[in-house]
Amino acid sequence: MKYTVVLEREADGGFVVSVPVLPGCVSQGDSRPEALANIREAVELYIEDCRLAGDPVPEEDSLEYVELMTGTR
């Protein structure tokens, strides 16, 4: 399965990463590679928990990306 992740740099230099289609699936890391490795593990555990509970595994059906430009004139 493929999931979109949102990777955000923290003020302290680390990263927070989340998976919008999997509510509550959030992780972090001191570096980008560490954060991505951690979210992969979190996604695997999330999916495993869904299956063990007999719940459907969420899938992305469609996403729309919009680039917004901001700034002063």
Image (cartoon, helix red, strand yellow):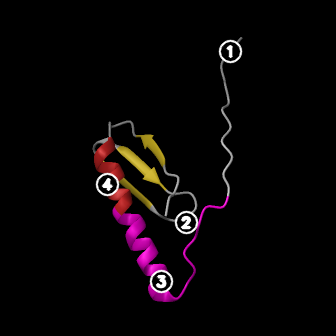
Q: Is residue 43 above or below residue 12?
A: below
Kind of residue at disc 2: Pro
* Disc nearer the start of the sequence (1/3): 3
4 vs 2, front mark? 4
- Quadrant that contains the C terminus: top right
Q: Pick whichever of labels 4 and 2 is earlier in the sequence.
A: 2
The kind of residue tagged 1 is Thr
Amino acid type at circle 4 is Ala
Counting from the top left corner in percent of width and height, residue 8 is at 45, 42
Q: CA distance from mark 2 to mark 3?
A: 15 Å
Whether 8 is among the magenta residues is: no
Please identify the quarter of the rendering in which residue 22 is found.
Answer: bottom right
Q: Amino acid at mark 3?
A: Arg
| Residue 60 location, quadrant | bottom right
Q: Earlier in the sequence, mark 2 or mark 3?
A: 2
Q: Callout 1 environment at 10 Å: few (<14), some (14 to 19), or many (20+)?
A: few
Marks 4 and 2, how far apart at CA: 18 Å
Mark 1 vs mark 2: give the one in front: 2
Q: Is residue 7 above or below residue 50?
A: above
Magenta stretch bounds:
41-61
- Sequence-first tag of 3 and 4: 4
Q: Residue at x 31, y 54 (%)?
A: 37
Q: Position of residue 27 (x, y in %)?
A: 38, 57
Question: Mark 4, residues whose alpha carbon is within 10 Å: few (<14), some, or many (≥20)?
Answer: some
Residue that badge 3 annotates: 51
SS at circle 1:
loop
Q: Which mark is residue 23?
A: 2
Residue annotated with mark 4: 37
Where residue 68 sits: x, y (%)?
68, 30
